[in-house]
Image (tube, grey):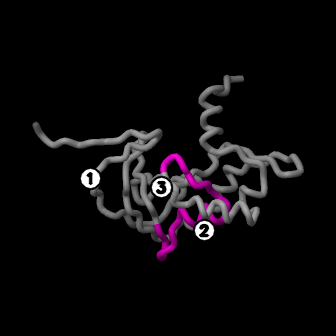
Amino acid sequence: MGNLFLVLLVGTLAVPFGSYAADTLSGSVRVIDGDTLAIGTTRVRIFGIDAPEADQTCTTMQGAKWKCGAWVSAEVEKRFGGRQATCEPMAVDRYGRTVARCHVNGEDIGATLVSEGLAFAYRQYSQHYVLAEKGAAVRDVGLHASQVQTPSEFRGLKAAFPATPG
């Protein structure tokens, strides 16, 4: 009958049970966006978080729009770009990215991004960073100081109403 490989498809993640035993990834961080990194030639989606899309905007409490997605990407670059990371692969998503927990000098990148208000806990896939997000919201740090649409809502609306050429 051959090898049986069971996969649970959950939204954007394909989570293998028992047979996903990829080696730990390590190397210099190249930031793709707020929740996606490259370690060498491997694209890594940080497990359990969701950050604004690069073209996403937010609104200040005074009503001014600002490019929060680009800001988040730049902040992630400042904090982690070029640093040595170790990532523990957990799955592969539908885009072929490795979904992993990543650390720099023992610091959990996902926890840092959520607690500093640069990303949200991605509750659809994990409850791991929910308390960190609540703490950031109480402190009004990062994205929590603005009106922001969740990244998943932004992606959904963008897919439903694609921009039409000029």
Q: Amino acid at mark 3?
A: Phe
State which quadrant residue 41 falls in.
Answer: bottom left
Q: Earlier in the sequence, mark 1 or mark 2?
A: 1
In the rendered image of this protein, does residue 94 appear above or below residue 140?
above
> Residue at coordinates 26% horizontally, 53% vertically from top-left?
18
- Residue located beneath label 3 in the image: 47
**Viewer can see residue 76:** no
SS class of the residue under badge 3?
loop
Q: Amino acid at mark 2?
A: Arg
Q: CA distance from mark 1 to mark 2?
A: 33 Å
Q: Position of residue 35 (x, y in %)?
A: 55, 54
- Mark number displayed over residue 18: 1
- Mark number displayed over residue 63: none
Q: CA distance from mark 3 to mark 1?
A: 17 Å
- Mark number displayed over residue 79: 2
State which quadrant residue 53 falls in.
Answer: top right
Q: Nearer the viewer, residue 83 or 11?
A: 11
Discs 1, 2 touching: Cβ within 8 Å: no
| Magenta span | 103-125
Nearest-to-viewer mark from 2 and 3? 3
Farthest residue in the bottom direction? 105
**Viewer can see residue 117:** yes
Nearest-to-viewer mark from 1 and 2? 1
| Mark 2 closeness class: few <14, some 14–19, many ≥20 residues within 10 Å | few
Q: Position of residue 74 (x, y in %)?
A: 65, 58
Tell whether 68 sits left or right of 112: right
Q: CA distance from mark 2 to mark 3?
A: 18 Å
SS class of the residue under badge 2?
helix
Tell whether 72 sits left or right of 146: left
